[in-house]
Amino acid sequence: MTTWRLTLRLLRRDWRSGELSVLAAALVLTVAAITAVGFFTDRVEATLHRQGSELIAADLVLESARPLAETFAARAQAQGLRIAQTLEFRSVVQGERPQLVLMKAVDAAYPLRGQLRIRSALDASDQAVAAGPPVGEVWVESRLLRLLNIRIGESLNIGATRLRIGAILSAEPDQSRAFFNIAPRVLMNRADLDATGLIGPVSRVTQRLLIAGAVSEIDTYRAWASTQLNAALTLTAARDARPEFSAALERASRFLHLATLVTLLVAGAAIALASQRLVERQTDTVAVMRCLGAPRHLVLRVLIGRLVLFGLAASLLGCLVGWLGQAGLFAALDDWIGVELPPASPAPLLVGLATGLIALLGFAVPPLLQLAQVTPLRALRRDLGTPRLSAALTLSAAGAALALLILWQAHDLELGLKLLGGVLATLLALIGSVLLLVQFAGRLTGRVRGVWRLGLAALTRRSATAVLQISGFGIGILALLLLAVVRVDLLEAWRETVPEGAPNYFLTTIQPADVAPLQAFLSEAGIAAPLLYPMITARLTQIGDRAVEPSAYPNPRAARLASREFNLSYGAEPQADNRIVAGTWWSEGAEAAPQFSVERGIAETLGMQLGETLTFSVAGRTVTGPITSLREVRWDSFNVNFFVVASPALLQQEAASYITSLYLPAAREGVIAELNRRFPSVATLDVEALIDQVRAVIERGVMAVEYVFLFTLAAGLLVMYAGLQASLEQRRREHGILRTLGAGRRTLLTSLAVEFTAVGVLAGLLASVFAEATGWLLATQLFELDFQLNPALWLIGVLGSGVVIGLAGTVATYPLLIHPPLRELRGG
């Protein structure tokens, strides 16, 4: 009880005296940032995933070529989830002539996410509807009307029944799942399916169960359903629907977590600097306690107990600030966000509390352990100073806390390990560079005179403090410069991955005989001739000496890929938005050799290795070749891309159709209507809705990152303030001695300006170098974006930090010069 009474008494005294103000601000800011980011990212990512759900018309989709067991629907309904069921199959409809179509029968609940778009006439505008066609009616693609020469309102023979054409089907939320569909699409009500007589025991039907609901319930259901999968049953989540959307969503998530981790790192530096100042201010108090008989273990318990209680109080306040911050932001940006956000969960509060305590214990406990080493003699001899603690212990504790928090907050082991390695390397390089610069300043001191010598000598006289200050300033400036790099350069590069004018139409199933006429038609329409790529359907049968069997892959996505047909292509050069990451592309002289280039993601999913042989079945013929390169593909560019590309001689003898993509503004959509009339076999796919979804993810992701970096900005400013405060106690005594020896106020003030300006220039120089290097690594290695050097960054980093820190440091220490020297020497 004595320990706790003493702990509470000292905590109240320190709080009233303002001793804990800087440390409290650093900790509250840390927890507020983590909590606000937690609330914000949870809600924004849930919204982004909800937008992804619109691409599959649900949150989860179970798909099978066989009837789905009733247990899947029953389990979903028992959990309070909404369900819808669809069936897809190919059939033939009768008009002037038979026509192959892709039939899709949907129930009244479809779609669970997103909206259908229909038109009442060929030249009418789209309108959104919430449900599919009514009983007795079908909606068809405009291409089918032209192929059969029929109109809206007429009836269509579908199997044993006739159904009225009620509207033109413009778009379905899950249309992108059948990206390269050859046949026109027909949407019908599932209640009409039995009357058609088209579905029998041996019919090839794709059955889907669509599921939607709360995020937690969806996660629970997904975990259960994953254990029920087999080779014939696949489970697709929203973010796995399309690689274009998946890439944008992945980048958004990484940007948000990166912003969180940068804030955490910078605020941790502020905690470390504030703890160092607290140690200096508490040394006399501990010395008096030791004189009054307090044993060392009691002092240690009181210090740790006070720190824990203080940490809990500051962390709770930080949680409140974080919650208010995110709530205020969402209220202010409600119209901009434009979508309904899910409510915040309490999980970020617990994460914030835990993060605050871990950060405080890791960064603040080692400096406070110094106080336990204070001897009673310090109360009489102030020149004894504060006992030094092992640098290895201090760095180890801070490094362990930093590693734990980074790996925890990254939510991605690969991202966490990369950031941890980068952060540790940057900190070591930063500290090493500071040591070298301080030594250089020491050598320069002997070659200058007057206030210049006095100012530079201060760096070498307090070398440990100088290293701590410059490192702290460097981290703070680095955070501010990274804010500029990420905010301006990387986010703008991310926006440009889907620039204005990105292809919004895909033309597929172009027959060789139509290639030249189609190019001529597009030229006449004033559209630059797009590149046409050959496309050949093939089935992967063997990887190396392993037969490709879906049942051999426990990963549902891998099993689905193993069971599907691939669209192969061939070419002499890689596409402009493809990057070779392993191996080499075939050269012109070696094009006769059979070779494959594989997209890196699918190679990892299916276990393909560079140098292994792939075997495909193409129209009954076997083609074989080694993997000679792996590619990174920018799926969100919306250009035509392929998972597997072959050398020309391997596939150019095979029968192929062609595919291309092009951009058409809304005012020129009539070109597509004329194209469909003149080339009825060419399938056109409008991906404008998909592009809009990806752009929405990018824009909201950018907005989220900008918000998160406001905390980084505040943390960077706090680091610099804590750095200025870190050496005040030492300066107080030094200035008292110098003024006693005859140094004037103007001389000391000028030397302070020289010292802090030099500190600012050195910190700015290091921060600029590391900001450019970090920006390059983030762009090329983490986000797969283009990066360009920013000369303005160096001007702001070096000159700006020199001026700002020089002025701020001089102003902050000026009060030490206006008091009488005797007062400073007595510590008054």
Image (cartoon, rainbow, N blue to C red):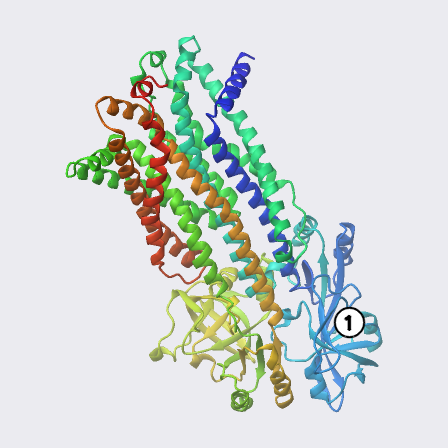
Quadrant housing residue 175: bottom right
| SS for callout 1 | loop
Q: Is residue 465 above or below residue 629?
A: above
Q: Residue at x 53, y 26 (%)?
A: 310
- Tell me where residue 669 sits by quadrant: bottom right
Q: Is residue 422 above or below residue 250?
A: above
Q: Residue at x 70, y 49 (%)?
A: 217
Determine whether 567 is above or below 248 in the image: below
- Nearest the viewer among 206 and 769 is 769
User: Quarter holding the C terminus?
Assistant: top left
| Percent coordinates x, y for residue 731 in the rendering | 31, 27
The residue singled out by tag 1 in the image is 201
Q: Is residue 295 left or right of residue 501?
A: left
Point out the image quarter for the N terminus: top right
Residue 42: x and y in percent read 60, 48
| Spot occupied by residue 819 in the image (x, y as percentages of width and height) | 34, 24
